[in-house]
Image (spheres, rainbow, N blue to C red):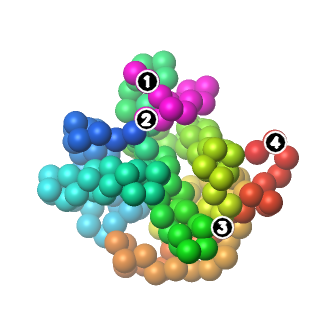
Amino acid sequence: MSYFLETSRVGFRTWTENDFVLAKELWGNPIVMQNISAQTKLSDSEIQEKLNSEISNLKKFGVQYWPCFLLESDTFIGTCGLRPYKLFDGIFEMGIHLLPEYWNKGIGYEAASAMIEHAFNTLNISSLFAGHNPQNLASSILLKKLGFRFTHYEFYPPTGLNHPSYILNTEELSPGK
């Protein structure tokens, strides 16, 4: 498989129209969806809509929540990427959705670190926003470890909750990140 971005364990590629099975594996998983949406069971048409949205984001904005794979086996593990947030201010949202069997293995940190570097050094994005379900403490820990700074709570319509929200600017990165 060909990847546009790689870490020691993770490869990133773009979504295609032929990726419905992968999209369904991720966004059809109620354990994954419990942190993303109040609606933990998506229909096939809703999953297709999410896939189409990611493909459209790449065409319109040059970013998406890119599908990620283990390099050693080309096994699909989830997504990590960017989407428009406040384009007028040059801010993109960074997010990561991993299949549960890849949680707590350092893969999220590895993928997100690479995405931050890609956003700032390749795409010349100056600020990244991230938020998480308030019940997802692992995401809170990950974002702080990555250098994101808590700024506010923001209502997130898909969950119906106020999500802790963070920002990361290029100048806030510590050396070595």
Q: Residues within 10 Å of mark 2 (few under 14, many from 20)?
A: some
Q: Which residue is mark 1?
A: 2
- Is the Cβ of the residue at disc 2 closer than 8 Å to that at disc 1? yes
Q: In the rendering, which numbered label is found on residue 13? A: 2
Q: In the rendering, which numbered label is found on residue 42? A: none
Looking at the picture, which amino acid does disc 4 mark? Answer: Gly
Alpha carbon distance from label 3 to label 4: 19 Å
Is 130 left, or right, of 53 in this rendering?
A: right
Is 70 left, or right, of 22 in this rendering?
A: right
Q: In the rendered view, tell whether residue 118 sits above or below residue 169.
A: above
Alpha carbon distance from label 3 to label 2: 25 Å
Is disc 2 placed on a helix, strand or loop? loop
Residue 77 visible in image: no
Q: In the rendering, which numbered label is found on residue 176? A: 4
**Residue 11 magenta-highlighted:** yes
Q: Which percent across, then down, holds residue 119?
A: 61, 50
First in sequence: mark 2 vs mark 1: 1
Instruction: Give the extent of the magenta segment.
Output: 1-13
Q: Residues within 10 Å of mark 3 (few under 14, many from 20)?
A: many
Looking at the picture, which amino acid does disc 1 mark? Answer: Ser
Q: Which percent across, then down, holds residue 126?
A: 68, 61
Residue drawn at point x = 56 percent, y = 74 percent: 88
First in sequence: mark 3 vs mark 1: 1
Q: In the rendering, which numbered label is found on residue 167? A: 3
Quadrant of the rendering where the C terminus is positioned: top right
**Residue 120 magenta-highlighted:** no
Q: Residues within 10 Å of mark 4 (few under 14, many from 20)?
A: few
Label 3 or label 2, whichever lies nearer to me, is 2
Quadrant of the rendering where the N terminus is positioned: top left
Alpha carbon distance from label 2 to label 1: 7 Å
